Amino acid sequence: MLIIYQTCFSSRSRLAAASVQVASSEGFGEESRKDLILLICSIFLANQGAGEGGGEEMVLPTDEAAVLQGEQEAEKMIIEAYSALLLAFLSTESKSIRDAISDCLPDRNLASLVPVLDRFVVCVLTSKP
């Protein structure tokens, strides 16, 4: 059990310290390295708010455009939830990692992850196997 515990936490530290190679947006074959935490935070922020429904009544889509829009919103919600989950997981590794994540988020804290993680837990607990 101790070996699994040490492997998990060692991997989490390596993951938090990783950088990834990203192609340039100009598409001229230029690539740069980006900090993984910054990349995950950017993904989370780009999809933030996708799961906030505001209590609207469920309406069945009647045309293909409405179905497509629903699918796109569902994809954004999934991306938002899993990026929040990964950031929360990494944030438990150390104070320096938690601070690095917080620096990338609104108000420089982890509070923006909480409602997303709450919705994720509700979704997991209420979904049928």
Image: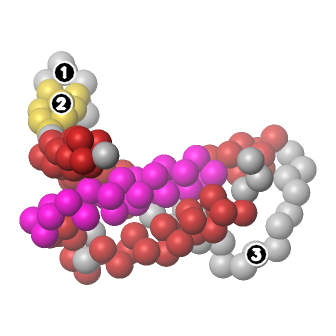
Residue underneath mark 1: 28
Looking at the picture, which amino acid does disc 1 mark?
Answer: Phe
x 66%, y 78%: residue: 54
Per the model, the C-alpha gap separating discs 3 and 1 is 45 Å
Where is residue 4, by image quadrant? top left
Per the model, the C-alpha gap separating discs 1 and 2 is 15 Å
Looking at the picture, which amino acid does disc 2 mark?
Answer: Gln
The residue range painted magenta reads 73-97
For marks 2 and 3 on the same chain, the one whose residue lies earlier in the sequence = 2
Per the model, the C-alpha gap separating discs 2 and 3 is 41 Å
Residue underneath mark 3: 56
Please state which of residues 50 and 12 is positioned toward the viewer in this rendering. Answer: 12
| Label 2 crowd bin: few (<14), some (14–19), many (20+), radius 10 Å | few
Residue underneath mark 2: 21
**Given this view, does label 3 or label 1 mark the residue nearer the observer?**
3
Membership of 49 in magenta stretch: no
| Label 1 crowd bin: few (<14), some (14–19), many (20+), radius 10 Å | few
x 19%, y 21%: residue: 28
Q: Secondary structure at mark 1?
A: loop
For marks 3 and 1 on the same chain, the one whose residue lies earlier in the sequence = 1
| Label 3 crowd bin: few (<14), some (14–19), many (20+), radius 10 Å | few
Q: Secondary structure at mark 2?
A: strand
